[in-house]
Image (spheres, helix red, strand yellow):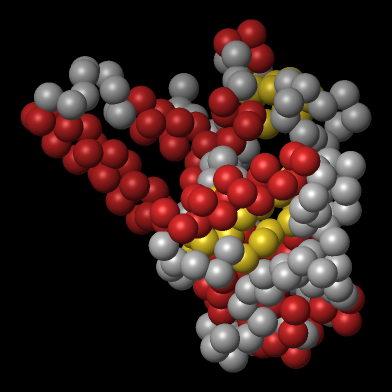
Amino acid sequence: MISTLNSHYYLYFTDRHRKPRQKCVALGTGKKSVALKLKARLEDEYALGTFDPWAPKVEIAQPTVEEAAALFLQSRKELRPKSQTAYRTATKGLLARVPPGLLVSHLEARNIRPYVFDPKVRAETQRHRFRHVRVFIRWCKKMGYLDQDPLREIKMPKAGQSLAAFLSPGEVERMLAAIDADAVMKRAEGTARPGEIIWLKNVVILAVNTGMRRGELCHLRWEAVGFHLREECERLPDQVRPRAGDPDDGRRTVATCLPP
């Protein structure tokens, strides 16, 4: 596989029986025509056994942290958009705190700490940053860019005590009004049929009045609702993980506060 980064071409060789599984060789050119010729020649030599990308004498590309981050993000193209955004945000934040042009092989714990342990962010955000940077560092080691793990001197930030956030009555009213306005606008545009969008109001009302979780709402069935008892006995399906404090059988009963 051939790839370009910062107007320079790199050739990748993969062998699942070697360590690391993938090696990157700098072709030393920014011209595609020259890079393709070098690619064809080196791949032929590799097939004949006269060229070994894993041999010590081969010049392996030593990218900067910025270049390694770009290659890392390319390797995450098959992930969900949300996951790609999370990794892009993490690498961007890390790059803002390392010296320009720093080789990834020179990356140290002191370059990572300011980003992970930023006092301006919450403890959960610090843990989120640590997890995503850790994936990037492990990828760099797998690619042969790092010999030692700079995170070995850094521990996962401690979890903070998060307080449950509740919507105020005014916020609930504004949310329901926004759903109404969105439904009216999209019906006028012809992008929504009658009944679409507006059903979300019922979900919000049910969630606010019962305290049911998202997974419970999505898997709620009529047979779980006891109107005569004015309660809902929601059986969690296998794919919804019970939380601490839930009964052992996964059944959680919630009282309704809905009008008769």
Judge left or right: residue 119 versus residue 152. Answer: left
| Percent of width and height locating residue 150 | 82, 78
Judge left or right: residue 25 versus residue 81. Answer: right
Relative depth, front residue between 73 and 101: 101
Residue 153 drawn above or below residue 71 = below
Say if residue 211 shows up in the picture.
Answer: yes
Relative depth, front residue between 84 and 6: 6
| Percent of width and height locating residue 128 | 67, 64
Say if residue 84 shows up in the picture.
Answer: no
Residue drawn at point x = 28 percent, y = 39 percent: 179
Relative depth, front residue between 54 and 87: 54
The quarter of the picture where residue 228 lies is top right
The quarter of the picture where residue 230 lies is top right
Residue drawn at point x = 73 percent, y = 70 percent: 59
Residue drawn at point x = 22 percent, y = 32 percent: 183
| Percent of width and height locating residue 223 | 64, 8
Residue 50 drawn above or below residue 208 = below
Residue drawn at point x = 85 percent, y = 61 percent: 55
Kindly give the residue lying farthest to the left in the view shown: 188
| Percent of width and height locating residue 204 | 44, 37
How many marks overall? Answer: 0
